[in-house]
Image (tube, helix red, strand yellow):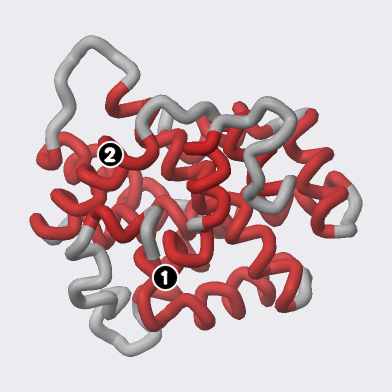
Amino acid sequence: MNLVNDLLGQLSGAPVQQVSQQLGVDPGTAESAIQAALPMLIGALGQNAQQPQGAEALFGALQNDHQGLDIGSVLGAVLGGGNSSAGLSPQAGMAAAAAPAILGHIFGGKQQAAEQTLGSATGLNSPQTRMLMQILAPIVMAYLAKRFFGGQQAASPTQLQSVLGQEQEQIRQQPGAGGLLGSLLDQDGDGQLGIGDALSAASRFLKS
């Protein structure tokens, strides 16, 4: 099972209901929007990780700042505004509060373009689109950390680069999701997100 489909499965049901309430839309619209947004986020991470320094920085961020988090806690913290009350861990609250910074690292100067691309595809307005991406960004990071550090086999930046690269290729071959990601990546014709060294400091994922 690929990463996007696996994460979509984990967000089905109650999480979609919670997101729909936060966005002020019906559950069907929320689910469709999540289905469009996740490939963009994971595909963009895959693009960034193709550069060795990007893979190393992302690996460090996942290991240091997101390891041990579960999706439910992060979702609860995001929907709760980033506070760690109601039994949520401080780390989950930090991840939620860092959502805007995480998006900045993922998309760099193309964050606004990513939001516009997603809004055009889903029918969400600009505040809804931004909110959805801020909900999903820390969830994606928590999911990847659990995927790579939750097993017995030692993970590495090279392994992360390989898995995300394969995932990005799969996304780009899909008619809907691939078109959205391709449109974002190729807006300036070079196939790059243009983030430069946006991932150069892994510790800034949760400290920006």
Mark 1, mark 2: which one is toward the viewer?
2
Q: Earlier in the sequence, mark 1 or mark 2?
A: 2
Type of amino acid under label 1: Gly
Type of amino acid under label 2: Asn
Residue 154: x %, y % from top left: 15, 20
What residue is rendered at 73% in x and 46% in y?
A: 80
Which quadrant of the figure contains the N terminus?
A: top left
As rendered, which of 124 and 82 lies closer to the eye?
A: 82
As rendered, which of 140 and 44 lies closer to the eye?
A: 140
What residue is rendered at 30% in x and 53% in y?
A: 46
The picture quadrant where one finds residue 109 is bottom left
Q: Answer yes or no: is residue 24 visible.
A: yes
Residue 58: x %, y % from top left: 25, 50
Crowdedness near tag 1: few (<14), some (14–19) or many (≥20) residues, C-alpha within 10 Å:
some
The picture quadrant where one finds residue 59 is top left
Please tell me the numbered disc located at residue 165: none
Q: Answer yes or no: is residue 173 visible.
A: no
Q: Secondary structure at mark 1?
A: helix
Q: Is residue 140 left or right of residue 54?
A: right
Residue 146: x %, y % from top left: 39, 27
Please tell me the numbered disc located at residue 104: 1
The picture quadrant where one finds residue 108 is bottom left
As rendered, which of 14 and 84 lies closer to the eye?
A: 84
What residue is rendered at 87% in x and 49% in y?
A: 21
Q: Which residue is mark 2?
A: 64
As rendered, which of 138 and 77 lies closer to the eye?
A: 77
Residue 62: x %, y % from top left: 31, 41
Q: Is residue 27 left or right of residue 175?
A: right
What residue is rendered at 52% in x and 65% in y?
A: 100
Crowdedness near tag 2: few (<14), some (14–19) or many (≥20) residues, C-alpha within 10 Å:
some
| In the depicted structure, whether residue 7 falls above or below residue 49 | above
